[in-house]
């Protein structure tokens, strides 16, 4: 679980950096299509590249840890923006062909169950 915690910590730093420099851009969004600007930022691209280096057995628990860390903070605009980006990132990762194949083939089915969370409302089981 050491890799997962390290990956989660790195991802939270990357997304926090992205939000801190682009928060004002989110305020100027007028359409849903305008929300895609963050995917072109180096922090987001780097997070994608890093996660591609790991199997879903590493990045999936890391995303759960990341969501839990964001959810445990006091609610503010930054938290909402971070949660938005992390949810979009998670959606992208859950559509990853390697992950979809594992789900459909039931390969590692016993392992692809995320039981880690201290907040019952954040429990994710796949």
Image (cartoon, rainbow, N blue to C red):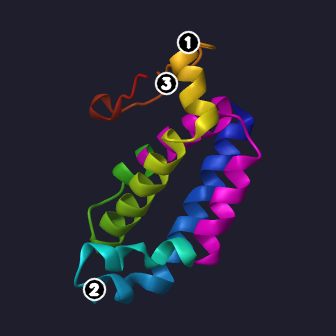
Give the residue drawn at x 45%, y 79%. Answer: 37
Which percent across, then down, holds residue 23? 39, 83
Q: Secondary structure at mark 3?
A: loop
Horizontal placement of 41 versus 90: left or right?
right
Residue at mark 2 = 27
Q: Residues within 10 Å of mark 3 (few under 14, many from 20)?
A: some
Q: Residue 9, relative to residue 63: is it above or below?
A: below
Nearer the observer: mark 2 or 1; the answer is: 1
Image quadrant occupied by the C terminus: top left
Report the Cα–Cα distance between label 2 and label 3.
34 Å
Q: Residues within 10 Å of mark 1 (few under 14, many from 20)?
A: few
Report the Cα–Cα distance between label 2 and label 1.
42 Å
Residue 50 is a magenta residue: yes
Residue 68 is a magenta residue: no
Give the residue drawn at x 30%, y 60%. Answer: 74
Horizontal placement of 83 versus 103: left or right?
left
Which percent across, then down, holds residue 41? 58, 78
Give the magenta range: 41-67
Horizontal placement of 83 versus 48: left or right?
left
| Quadrant in the rendering for residue 81 | bottom left
Q: Secondary structure at mark 1?
A: loop
Q: Residue 93, relative to residue 88: is it above or below?
A: above
| Quadrant in the rendering for residue 44 | bottom right
Residue at mark 1 = 106
Disc on the earlier residue, 2 or 1: 2
Examine the rendering and report whether any part of residue 114 can be seen: yes
Residue at mark 3 = 114
Q: Residue 101, relative to residue 2: is it above or below?
A: above
Q: Secondary structure at mark 2?
A: helix
Image quadrant occupied by the N terminus: top right
Give the residue drawn at x 39%, y 52%. Answer: 87
């Amino acid at each position: 679980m050491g890799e997962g915690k390290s990956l989660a910590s790195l991802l939270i730093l990357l997304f926090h950096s992205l939000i801190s420099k682009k928060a004002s851009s989110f305020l100027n969004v007028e359409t849903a299509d305008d929300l895609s600007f963050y995917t072109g930022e180096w922090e987001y691209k780097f997070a994608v590249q890093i996660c591609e280096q790991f199997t879903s057995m590493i990045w999936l628990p890391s995303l759960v840890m990341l969501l839990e860390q964001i959810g445990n903070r006091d609610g503010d605009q930054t938290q909402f923006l971070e949660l938005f980006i992390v949810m979009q990132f998670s959606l992208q990762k859950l559509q990853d062909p390697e992950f979809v194949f594992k789900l459909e083939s039931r390969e590692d089915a016993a392992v692809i169950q995320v039981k880690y969370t201290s907040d019952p409302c954040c429990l994710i089981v796949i």
